[in-house]
Amino acid sequence: MNGIEHLPPWAAVVTAVLLLIGAAVTLIGSLGLLRLGTFYERVHAPTLGTTLGTVFIAAASMVYFSVLQSRPTLHEILIIVLGVVTTPIALTVLVGAARFRDTAERAQPSESEDR
């Protein structure tokens, strides 16, 4: 038993809606990864989808456990803050490394130019 039978219907509905929205946003971000062409285009969709999806899923967890435990659970706020802070940093590092690689590849002479 996980206590779900003690969850009021309004909390179950709010939790389900937040979970579905979070899953849908994450799925849309993942589809953007498949749909877009270049690396620079692909990196944005999953980053935005993951961040917003995490916020909705963590909010659903906050509602669920706050209602079940009759006290606010705020651990998820730390998850949200870390996700919102680290995801753009990871995006910046990935794009910077890709740009550095692209610049280095353009700077090297090709084999046909050596002859």
Image (cartoon, rainbow, N blue to C red):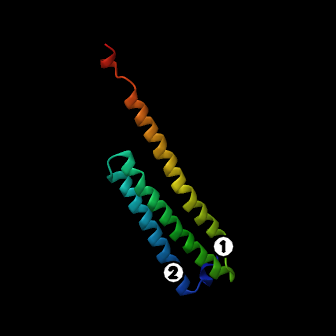
User: In the image, what residue occupies the spot 34% across and 15% down?
Assistant: 114
> Residue 1 placed where, x, y %?
65, 74
Q: Which of labels 1 and 2 is toward the front?
A: 1
Q: Are marks 1 and 2 in contact (CB under 8 Å)?
A: no
Q: CA distance from mark 1 to mark 2?
A: 17 Å
Can you tell which quarter of the image residue 66 is in? bottom right
Q: Residue at x 41, y 59 (%)?
A: 29
What amino acid type is highlighted by mark number 1?
Leu
Where in the figure is residue 93, as x and y percent of width and height?
52, 46
Q: Position of residue 109 (x, y in %)?
A: 36, 23
Q: Residues within 10 Å of mark 2 (few under 14, many from 20)?
A: some
Residue furthest to the front in view is 107
* Vertical arrangement, residue 16 with respect to residue 86, above or below: below
Horizontal side of residue 64 vs 25, given as left or right: right
Location of residue 88 in the rendering, given as x and y in whole percent from the top left corner: 51, 56
Rendered-image quadrant of the C terminus:
top left
Residue at the spot 53% in from the left edge and 86% down from the top edge:
10
What residue is disc 1 on? 74
Callout 1 environment at 10 Å: few (<14), some (14 to 19), or many (20+)?
some
Secondary element under disc 2, as helix, strand or loop, is: helix
**Which residue is identified by label 2?**
14
Q: Earlier in the sequence, mark 1 or mark 2?
A: 2
Q: Nearer the viewer, residue 6 or 48?
A: 48
In this rendering, the answer to whether 25 lies above or below 92 is: below
Total numbered labels placed on residues in the image: 2
Which circle marks residue 97 in the picture? none
For this orientation, the residue located farthest to the top is: 115
Residue sitting nearer the eye, 74 or 106? 106
Amino acid type of the residue that numbered disc 2 sits on in the rendered structure:
Val
Residue at 63% across / 76% down in the picture? 65
